Image (cartoon, rainbow, N blue to C red):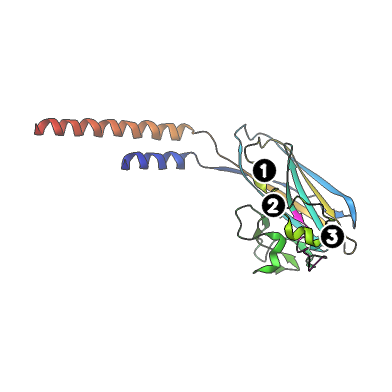
Amino acid sequence: MKLILILTLSLTAASAVRADTFTSHPDVAVPDFDLNGVADTIQVSGLGANPIADVNVSLQMAGGWNGDYYAYLWHGGQSAVLLNRVGRTGTNPDGYSNGGFGPDALGGSFTLDDQAAADVHRYQAGTFELYTGKLTGTWQPDGRRLDPEATGAEFDLALRPAMLDVFNGLDANGAWSLYLVDASPGAVGRLVSWEITVAQVPEPGSAALALMATGWATVVLRWKHRRSRLASTD
């Protein structure tokens, strides 16, 4: 049992998750109070057909009013809601007033990740950091598949079905499109850049197959050695 466990762990390590990052730098203004918004597309190719295991998205946005932004990512017939009027609630219909999302003082990106500790929609409910006025850090995407013009009370009750895991199991190749809207009048912001990091679990390669062969050879040798010891004691 111990040997089989070691072999399993070795095969798992040999089939390590592969992650690839793709970046776009549109540097475009987001039209104020215009539900047409802006769109930008990253074309992914050459990753092979292994299904997606995880997706993270990083954004750099300058200015505007964070509580105005609605953003979603589309790929393969699925969409994940990244931002949806962050901070908008029944008691705060305008949402959070901070201006933008971006890197911290050390250059660490603002990232949306399903495995993060806290929901970006309520980032001011806990500890958060701003750098040059922009929200930094790693957060869960908003995930609320709700009309950005919905009332604050509707946001209070909204579920979160549109997380980044909607892409799991899909082919990573093809178009990844970011749609960004400023849903309320006031400050104007810019989409400076964005990137996606796509993780795939590859099929066991030659290293894994070699480990398997070595492991089973060891099992057989130990089994034969044990039989010979038992026979000598009879």
Q: Is residue 140 above or below residue 213?
A: below
| Label 2, label 1: how far apart the Cα atoms are | 11 Å
- Can you identify the residue that label 2 sits on? 160
Q: Position of residue 5 (x, y in %)?
A: 36, 42
- Can you identify the residue that label 3 sits on? 189
Which mark's residue is nearer the viewer, 1 or 3? 1
Regarding mark 3 in the picture, which secondary structure is present there?
strand
Camera sees residue 129: no
Dot 2 amino acid type: Arg
Q: Position of residue 69 (x, y in %)?
A: 81, 57
Within-10-Å neighbours for mark 1: few <14, some 14–19, many 20+: some
Dot 3 amino acid type: Gly
Within-10-Å neighbours for mark 3: few <14, some 14–19, many 20+: many
> Quick check: 145 left or right of 14?
right
Question: Is disc 1 in contact with disc 3, using a CB cutoff of under 8 Å?
Answer: no
Which mark's residue is nearer the viewer, 2 or 3? 2
Dot 1 amino acid type: Val
Which residue lies most toward the left here? 234
Q: Quadrant of residue 33?
A: bottom right
Q: Quadrant of the N terminus?
A: top left
Regarding mark 1 in the picture, which secondary structure is present there?
helix
In magenta, the rendered stretch is: 83-93
> Quick check: 103 left or right of 15?
right
| Label 2, label 3: how far apart the Cα atoms are | 26 Å
Q: Which SS type dominates the magenta stretch?
A: loop
Circle on res. 166: 1
Q: Quadrant of the C terminus?
A: top left
